[in-house]
Image (spheres, grey):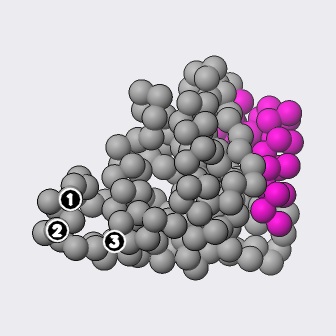
Amino acid sequence: MNILAFAATNSSQSINKQLVTHAAEMLASAQPDITTEILDINDYELPLFSIDRENQLGKPELAQAFFDKIGAADAVIISFAEHNGSYTAAYKNLFDWVSRIDPKVFQGKPMVLLATSPGAGGARNVLAAAETSAPHFAGDVKASLSIPSFYENFDMETGALSNEALATKLKDALVSLL
């Protein structure tokens, strides 16, 4: 089984990338036949989407490459950063470009959606938006989990959740992909 994982942010200091990396490692260590690929959406940076740019550029190679990565995976794990209650501009822009290749962006893949933030909200707003939206783009959401107060619940030295209750919830969410 091939798992594709990424944080829906372009921050080089992303706590969501730390979370999604931890999740992918948890899944891989639980099942030896699982391989994981952790993408950095900075590798797929595109000009700001508009119809004018689409008419000028067509379907950019990087958008197609990202779409192909999703297509090659058996399942997808995404951890969403929240900017002003919504998606990051970097993720939304990439998503907009990819959706022009095929509106079924997630190609029927089973998905686990995560989100975290430094505060008690745990990026719940963007997670709720992603849960609602993904099925419209052929995403099969199996589970979702918000991790509040990241720095209180995640051990930066070990790169793992330190809160046992949240770690159990994450494990249960990930098992839904199997």
Residue 36 visible in image: no
Q: Amino acid at mark 1?
A: Ile
Label 3, on which residue?
A: 62
Is there CB contact under 8 Å for labels 2 and 1? yes
Q: Nearer the viewer, mark 2 or mark 3?
A: 2
| Residue 2 at x, y percent in the picture | 68, 75
Q: Amino acid at mark 2?
A: Asn
Q: Is residue 127 magenta?
A: no
User: Marks 2 and 3, how far apart in space?
Assistant: 16 Å
Of the 4 image quadrants, the one containing the N terminus is bottom right
* Res. 51 mark: 1
Check the picture and name the quadrant holding the C terminus.
Answer: bottom right
Q: Residue 88 got which mark?
A: none
How packed mark 1 is, by other alpha carbons closer than 10 Å (few <14, some 14-19, many 20 or more), is few
Marks 3 and 1 sit apart, C-alpha to C-alpha, by 17 Å
Indicate the amino acid at tag 3: Leu
Q: Residues within 10 Å of mark 3 (few under 14, many from 20)?
A: some
Q: Which region shows up in magenta?
A: 153-178
The residue where tag 2 is placed is 55
Q: Is residue 118 above or below residue 3?
A: above
